Amino acid sequence: MTHVVTEACVRCRYTDCVEDCPVDCFHLGPTFVVIDPEICIDCGLCVAACPVGAIVHADLLPDGQKDYLRLNADFAKRWPRITRRQPELPDADQWRAITDKRRWLED
Ligand code: F3S
């Protein structure tokens, strides 16, 4: 299985998770990051690194977030791989507490 980046990441994109990944499985999009499920080794180190709790194991995806498994796999094929932390989005802190952010997931 794999871990999955979920909606809480949208418009925040802090990328602390990237620094803790031992296999460099993260890919960077305009407002979101994804995990390549074919590279992820399920170590779970990224879970605690995310300040907004956006990363969960695929088996634990809550209802309403299950399609993020497919979104992570699809975007990982097209978005560039990153191996270092990037600057968070300029208004990231304003988006931390917002839960309905799907419409701002840009490709
Ligand atoms: Fe997103 Fe959290 Fe990583 S906000 S970029 S999953 S640290």
Image (cartoon, helix red, strand yellow):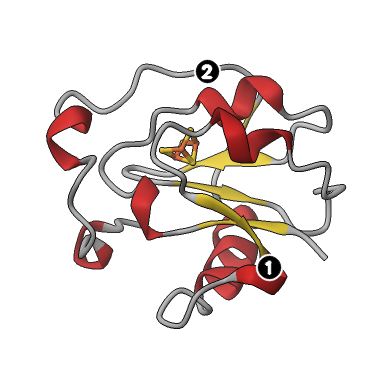
Between the residue at mark 1 and the residue at mark 2, the CA separation in whole angstroms equals 23 Å
Query: According to the image, label 1 marks what residue?
Result: 58
Task: Name the secondary structure under disc 2.
Answer: loop
- Across the whole image, how many numbered discs are drawn on residues? 2
The circle drawn on residue 10 is none
Q: Above or below — where is 94 with respect to 78?
A: above
Q: Establish whether ligand 1 lies closer than 8 Å to the Cβ of label 1.
A: no
Q: Quadrant of the N terminus?
A: bottom right
| Mark 1 touches mark 2? (CB < 8 Å) | no
Residue 31, given in percent of the width and then of the height, sits at: 32, 44
Quarter of the rendering containing residue 95 = top left
Q: Residues within 10 Å of mark 2 (few under 14, many from 20)?
A: some
Query: According to the image, label 2 marks what residue?
Result: 85
Q: Quadrant of the C terminus?
A: bottom left
Residue 57, given in percent of the width and then of the height, sits at: 68, 60
Residue visible at 87% across and 47% down in the picture: 41
Q: Amino acid at mark 1?
A: Ala
- Residue extending farthest to the right is 41
Residue 44, given in percent of the width and then of the height, sits at: 74, 42
